[in-house]
Image (cartoon, rainbow, N blue to C red):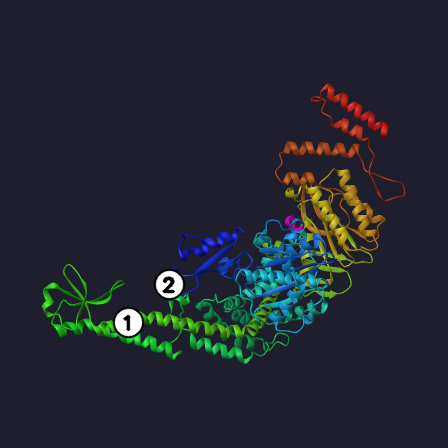
Amino acid sequence: MAGIPYHAMEAYVGKLLRSGLRVALCDQVEDAEAGRGLVRREVTRVLTPGTVLEDAYLNGSGSNYVLAICLRSHHHGLAALDCSTGELAVIRTDPTEAALQDELARLRPAEVVAAESDRSALSALIGSTPVTWVEPADFDPRAGSDRLLALLGVETLAAFGCEEWPEALAAGHAVLSYAERTHLRLEPGMVRLHAEHPQAFMHLDPATRSSLGLEAGRRLPAEESLLSLLQVESVTAMGTRTLQRWVSQPLRARERLESRLERVEQLGGEALKRGELRAALRKLPDLERILARVGQALVSPRELRQLAGALQVLPDVQRITSGWEDLATPPLPPVVDELERNLRAALVDEVPASIREGGVFRAGFDPALDAIREGSREAREWIAGLEAGERERTGIRSLRVGFNQVFGYYIEISHANRELVPNDYSRKQTLVNGERYITPELKEKESLVLNARSASNGREHVLYHELCDRIAAAAPVLLDIASWLGELDALAALAQLAVRHHWVRPVLHDEPGIRIRGGRHPLVELALGPGRFVPNDLRLEPSDSRIALLTGPNMAGKSTYLRQAGIIVLLAQVGSFVPAESAVIGLCDRIFTRVGAHDELARGLSTFMVEMVEAAHILAHATRHSLLIFDEVGRGTSTYDGVSIAQAILEYLHDAPKLQALTIFATHYHELTALSQRLPCLKNYRMEVREEGERIVFLHEVVEGGADRSYGIHVATLAGIPRQVVVRARQILEELEGRRPLERAPNDAQLQLPIEDPIVQELEQLDLERVSPREALDKLFAWQAQRGRS
């Protein structure tokens, strides 16, 4: 990329990065005045979507991961590095495609690094995410362990819990090596490692994340994103990222959740102190990203000024939180106060945007810089008074002192006054109407003025790098403080949400079971406005009501009810209060949702095929601690196929001894309600409606009992289908219900579908007006052969 204005570089580079490309930056690496011939240039940095540090190239305040994937037969290893904050997560997963899909959906990496030998296995899975294929030798677990030990300054990785994860350590080496190849400096103390243990968190597959609104800014608009609803209450970038991590990885450890809920309750209980705390936190910049840019010598003077302001705010935060037992700020190390005083003494109040402009440091901070500035100031003052003095000395009233970029300072005298030119003037330039002169003293002062700027900028660069080195030395302490501030902001945001929207603290249990009274969908409630949302209860117990079969018409609120159940359980395991009058939640290992219809044409999958694939995935991976949410299973095929599949799945969910998961199963097949007569752990519920003549009114209430009608034609009427079509649909419905009743076998509540001859069915559908004699004959032969086989 060449021929662009320097000041417009960010716009052009950003466009290339958003297209998944990499940009190499070349720069001079020697002094142009000191070198001879062409000035040496080298690639000083490679910008890639996953390794950028500048806010101009980053997507808001969220995490920006470059993800390394290591495929092995027993486990897969992943390492996610956010270069903009120094966060490094190492992960170990099951060796399945589904496990990788879950992690890709959770991390949403900006870029992927993988071994060339794994290209065929990963290409389809990674999709459109930019990927760099590297040599398999980059995935070296021993080298990864050594690299992390050096970066973290420890003797063992046992405390991090990943010492026995060779796959994850191999991925860690690959991602760190890749970052170094982009010319990023990986300094000790600037990388924070945490190992993510699979059993510590609830797993959420991509379909569930989408259904529950956990994809902010990418696939979902803000009004449909649960993540956006939570993050809007955070007041710092660190808090926004903390909430994103918490929501993407709900906890399964009750002790950690109770601790988080206790702190949310403390913050929610004191409105004045919470407001004071949030006001103080709002003054904080993105400390993690500023410190990352300090480590790469990319930080701007204005960001250092923001850092100085942030360090001044810390005592206020410490004072505000001192009254809360579980929220009190840890004592600030002396290095923090020392650094704050150093920054305040060093930086001017209104710093320039770049160190190149100079003027960053206060007068009195550095004697050498003050001497340079003083010499330049005196020389400028002398030059400023030179014109008046020389006019008086020479008697030449038209004498003028000037400056240009080529000849520097000069004294200009017209030809008419050349007889009055003093002997100490030396001719410098001849003009049409006069001459320009220089004096030894003016030349000396000129040298002072012209060299002072260069000398001043050079000295400021030295001071700036020294200041950044001091900040980098304190970075480990400052990063710990930034992490604590992010957590404090996230907790305050959850407390603010709870108070503002009247959420309650959930009661948590280790054993399965869900009892929600007056549950609400937070996004729908917000969209409708105060007092308009109809709350509903939910009870799922392993002993007698493990499966809730929900029937009722479209538009009555089934999907909202399903999603709100998942959201309430999710929020409880994030450590948040929940939108309900009360909630008792048995901790879940997974939430599965099969809600909504979509196809994946790029993979050659129809809507119904996607539905069946997702259902199969749920049945294969659910446990007794899982929450399963099904919506309209079987609707993508014929009625009899669909109801058969739906019934078989319900029976399997009820009877499989190793499954027994808590389940909400919504369906339009109201005939399935008869299953409650022989499946004791299945309970019928319906969306209540009120019929007023030919009209129906949706009450949005969930009540016990099954629906006996689907009301589809009523909904078509509400949608504006022409009356002629609606009338005809009612006639057809009456004919179908009269001709094809569903029959039940004697003394058996199981649904039995009428067996009809497929040949008769095909004959009924045959268009006799269009079939040719030849086609009719072929049909007869085919039917005859089919009858013979049967």
Q: Which residue is mark 2?
A: 36
- Along the viewing direction, whichever of 159 and 249 lies nearer the viewer: 159
Position of residue 59 measured from the top left corner of the image (x, y, whole percent)? 53, 57
Q: Amino acid at mark 2?
A: Arg
Magenta-tinted stretch:
121-125
Decide if residue 684 is on the left or right side of residue 33: right
Indicate the position of residue 94 as horizontal and vertical percent values.
72, 57
Instruction: State whether residue 743 appears in this view.
Output: yes
Disc 2 crowd, CA 10 A, few/some/many (<14, 14-19, 20+): few
In this rendered view, identify the residue nearer to me: 421 or 395: 421
Magenta highlight on residue 124: yes
87 or 469: nearer the viewer? 469
Q: Residue furthest right?
A: 747
Q: Determine which quarter of the picture holds residue 190.
A: bottom right
Q: Is residue 393 above or below residue 490?
A: below
Residue 142, placed above or below residue 752: below
Q: Earlier in the sequence, mark 2 or mark 1?
A: 2
Q: Main secondary structure of the magenta part?
A: helix
Location of residue 501 by image quarter: bottom right
Q: At which x and y percent is residue 735?
A: 75, 31
Residue 415 circle label: none
Question: Disc 2 and disc 1: Cα gap in Å?
Answer: 24 Å
Q: Nearer the viewer, residue 383 or 741?
A: 383
Mark 1 lies on a secondary structure that is helix
- Amino acid at pointer 1: Ser
Disc 1 target residue:
447
Mark 2 vs mark 1: give the one in front: 2
